[in-house]
């Protein structure tokens, strides 16, 4: 009877070892397949856009050195990624509209509420991902093409007082514009399906602001962008 129990325990241990090896192999296989050529991923996250610098001065008639700056904003984003090879990928990022406030700079310093606008900057990236497809950590670099869509531009009473004192309210529009966005980032795979990703980059983009008074101003926005997201691979 002792021999039978010993034999049963031995078989049970062998079965458990075989099962553990099978699970490990399946996990490794899933991890590799999830990041190889032909795989897709979708990620949800949060992205911050921080415009840098100030606009060029408004053309005459205006106060000398009338420049503006644009506030930062953060919004949810969704990214779709396709792996062409184990290392080369395309990623398309899209979020909800960002709201930016305009304030004075230069001779307008202290004018905190000149207006606001919303913008949506869908971006298509080409990326190179380092290390092996099965690696948990994969740094990457990329460059993207951004198209910034501006809408819901709203001028304030302060803007009217500066640009058209005593006249009707000043309104403004902003031209849509193309930009280039280099980026760096890092992906960490929790397992073969779920992952986290962080990225930082800068969009080189410039647009033109048109006031209803006939004045215009060039605005090199050149925002720094940063994002963190959680994703799922197919």
Image (cartoon, rainbow, N blue to C red):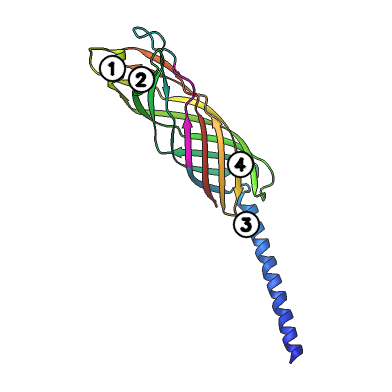
Q: Nearer the viewer, mark 2 or mark 4?
A: 2
Q: CA distance from mark 3 to mark 2?
A: 56 Å
Q: Earlier in the sequence, mark 1 or mark 2?
A: 2
Q: Which residues are magenta?
A: 46-55
Q: Nearer the viewer, mark 3 or mark 2?
A: 2
Q: Earlier in the sequence, mark 3 or mark 1?
A: 3
Q: Which residue is mark 4?
A: 186
Residue 176 percent coordinates (x, y): 41, 25
Q: Nearer the viewer, residue 163 or 231?
A: 163
Q: Earlier in the sequence, mark 1 or mark 4?
A: 1
Q: Nearer the viewer, mark 3 or mark 1?
A: 1
Q: CA distance from mark 1 to mark 4?
A: 46 Å
Q: Which residue is mark 2?
A: 111
Q: Nearer the viewer, mark 4 or mark 3?
A: 4
Q: Which residue is mark 3?
A: 30
Query: Marks 4 and 2: in contact by CB < 8 Å?
Result: no
> Residue 127's image quarter?
top right
Q: Secondary structure at mark 2?
A: loop
Q: Nearer the viewer, residue 226 or 191?
A: 226
Q: Which residue is mark 1?
A: 160
Q: Secondary structure at mark 3?
A: helix
Q: Earlier in the sequence, mark 4 or mark 3?
A: 3
């Amino acid at each position: 009877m002792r021999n039978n129990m010993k034999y049963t325990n031995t078989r049970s241990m062998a079965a458990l070892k075989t099962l553990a090896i099978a699970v490990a192999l399946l996990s490794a296989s899933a991890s590799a397949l999830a990041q190889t050529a032909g795989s897709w991923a979708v990620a949800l996250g949060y992205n911050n856009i921080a415009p840098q610098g100030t606009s060029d001065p408004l053309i005459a008639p205006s106060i000398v050195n009338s420049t503006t700056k644009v506030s930062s904003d953060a919004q949810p984003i969704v990214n779709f990624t396709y792996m062409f090879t184990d290392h080369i990928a395309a990623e398309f990022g899209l979020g909800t509209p960002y709201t930016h406030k305009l304030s004075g700079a230069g001779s307008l310093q202290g004018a905190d509420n000149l207006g606001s606008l919303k913008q949506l900057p869908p971006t298509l990236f080409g990326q190179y991902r380092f290390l092996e497809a099965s690696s948990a950590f994969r740094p990457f670099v990329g460059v993207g093409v951004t198209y910034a869509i501006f809408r819901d531009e709203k001028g304030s009473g302060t803007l009217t007082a500066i640009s058209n004192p005593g006249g009707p309210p000043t309104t403004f529009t902003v031209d849509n514009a193309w930009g280039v966005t280099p980026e760096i980032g890092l992906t960490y795979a929790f397992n073969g399906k779920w992952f986290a990703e962080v990225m930082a980059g800068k969009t080189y983009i410039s647009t033109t602001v048109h006031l209803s008074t006939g004045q215009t101003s060039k605005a090199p926005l050149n925002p720094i962008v940063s994002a963190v997201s959680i994703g799922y691979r197919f």
